[in-house]
Amino acid sequence: MAVSANYFDGQSAKDHPVTLDMNGTDLLFSGTDVSPTRWSLNGLYPLDPPSPGQPFRLTHVERPGARLILRDEAFIKTLVASSSHLKGGYSWADISHVFGWIIGGLVAVATITYICMALLPDRIAKILPNDWRNRVGRQMETAVVEGARICSTPKGDAALSTMIDNLAQGAPDMPPISVHIYDVPILNAFAVAGGNIIMTRELIEKADAPEEVAGVLAHEIGHVYHLHPEAQLVRLTGMQVLASIFTGSNGGNTTTNAALLATILTYSRSAEAEADAYARETMVKASIDPMGLKVFFEKILKIQGDMKGSSSTFKALGNLFSTHPGTEERIKEITPLPAGQVAVPALTPDEWQALKTICVR
Amino acid sequence: MTAPPINPPETLSFKYVPRPGLLKIALLNFFLGIVTLTIYRFWAKANTRKHIWSCIHINGEPLEYTGTGGELFRGFLMVFGLFILPYIVILKGLQLSLGETHPVTTGFGLLFAFAVYFLWGFAIYKQRKYQLSRTQWRGIRGTMAGSAMVYSLAYFGSMLARLFSFGWATPVMDTVLQEQITNDMRFGDAAFKFRGRAGPLYPTYALCWFLTGAFVIGITAFISYEAITWFGSELRALFDFFNGQTGESTPTERQHYLIGIIVLFIAAGLLSFFVVIPVLWAVYSAKEIRTFANYTSFDGAQFSLNARPWSMVWLTISNILLFVFTLSIARPFIIQRNLRYLVDRLSLEGAIDISRIQQSTAAMPKRGEGLADAFDLGAW
């Protein structure tokens, strides 16, 4: 049953009319300027799946540039019936190939994500040079405080250093820190990179005893000691690099963007627990009553409900202790000084008064 | 003795012959795109093109798209690995070491931005070259015969010219760029030619330019006037509130209402920018592609494209609506509509000896469109 077809040889755009026939294993065709050609059925490859009313376009593995166009419906039917691989569409091989790539890609992304998010940040944070940490930390501090006034009086500053010295009695290996109190009406405190610790006027004023402020300070020094801000910074940077795979963007600035800062300064529960443990240990060793921190935690829990709206970064950063569940458990962890150990005041009454009024102009 | 057979020159006719299957491709693209966090986009593009190309018939023989998603993916990996990733890693390193406000960090960012603008034309040219090399008709493929870097230089210059002329250099620049890219285009060993001047584009350009200006000024003035006359004092209070000046106070009910109105105005403003301005410029596009088709010839036969302003405006509006209301699922249909618009209106005046056209001997690019993907040059 010879039929007519068209042949393009892949060398020129000339349309060659050919007569086409098939035996059990081959397609045979020839034309006025096409010498008799034999294409094995096994090597045939459909360019589109056969569809009624459409010409059926074929090529052959040995002549990938050549095209054979069949229009005879009956012949096409017979041909497809004799070689089922011509039915076209998606084969399982195609599908598994594509999905293999996709799944492989996703596994690679998941692995890289795990490495960048969980394994590397703490390690990289440890090897960051100090002047990098300080420079970035100062930029973060500037961005966080949004131009708020820094509170400073000679007596207040002296009281603050005394408090740090008193805490250092319990932590000889305390990292170098720099504490600033800002005139901000929102109760908060946090550590940024480079040992820079920020506390607010509201926090100082809401505290009823120096031990409460000392507790918060010890907690923040814990973050500094464990390099939590640096690790979070590295983590976020890694996240931005990963995100760029999908979005093509560079993720923008990290330490001068409020939303990203909020992410950086929001720690995991285990990081908070580390900072708490550091605070408890330091206070006990320095003989400063850890119950001050406990009282303050409880106070904050109460205040939380009454926090009023504000769009500033301080609010975006969330309350010191409200960002994670389990605040009650954290409070329970805090126990008084061991029996027999005599508590030393964190500050004398005069010093405490000086610190309390550090923001008063 | 008989003379060797001489093939009579043929006239070419273009026809779009839709066939079923595009909906399936569109849905698959959308869902696999989500499941694979957009990485499927390369295969999505290839499948969409394969389908749409095969619907474009020239003298009864369809175009054939021979590109694959894998080629596009490798193109992306190449550009990402050699260009984007090093940039991001270095930038992040600088941000961590010197800080974000350090001049070196800023300078590095600017340098990269400059490189991106400089390579924009390169990406366009390479994308065109890849697509032509993967487009076959009668077994013959296309190519670009010139240099992508030369085009990129011209393109960069055109961006500066547009900027400094407030857009008025656009018709001239478009013509120059079109001339350059068309004259480099080949089908097999047959060349496209482009010759013409930008002058006839200017009346339409001026119309669209002034209408756009009037629209932007008008809508800005209208919104500001309405906002100030109705809500002057509340607006001030609201700004104070957002700046944290009033401390503890919460917004009043009227301020909540005002926020709603402002959101509505912003939405209306965005809508008009994303609908009215493209629609205005569709008038110019129609004029430009019609003119450019007339300036273009293939193997001595001249093209003609019957693109009219109203049909182009309708195409633009309907495409925007289609995109928005199907959450971009209909993207393949938008490509189809755009190509069909051209194919249905395109004709080639004059006959050419097609049989004479020999296969292109240019090397086939192995990967495709990495830069174009990185720059998000048209999504397709």
Image (spheres, coloured by chain):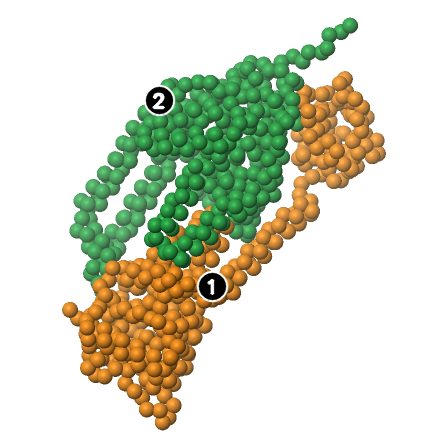
> Which residue carries the number 2 mark?
B202
Q: Chain of mark 1?
A: A
- Image point (45%, 67%), residue name: A126
Amino acid, disc 1: Ile
Quadrant containing the C terminus of chain A in the rendered view: bottom left
Amino acid, disc 2: Tyr
Instruction: Give the answer, above or below, for where A306 lies relative to A34.
Output: below
- Image point (61%, 38%), residue name: B366
> Which residue carries the number 1 mark?
A124
Seen in the image, is B155 located left or right of residue B248?
right
Mark nearer the viewer, 2 or 1: 1
> Dot 2, crowdedness within 10 Å: few (<14), some or many (≥20)?
some
Q: Chain of mark 2?
A: B
Q: CA distance from mark 2 to mark 1?
A: 59 Å
The chain displayed orange equals: A
Seen in the image, is A232 located left or right of residue B59?
left
Task: Where is residue B209? Give x, y as percent.
Answer: 32, 28
Task: Where is residue B100? Give x, y as percent.
Answer: 36, 54
Count of numbered marks: 2
The chain displayed green equals: B
**Would residue A34 be seen by someone viewing this image from the given angle?**
yes
- The local secondary structure at tag 2 comes to helix
- Image point (24%, 62%), residue name: A148
| Label drawn at residue A55 | none
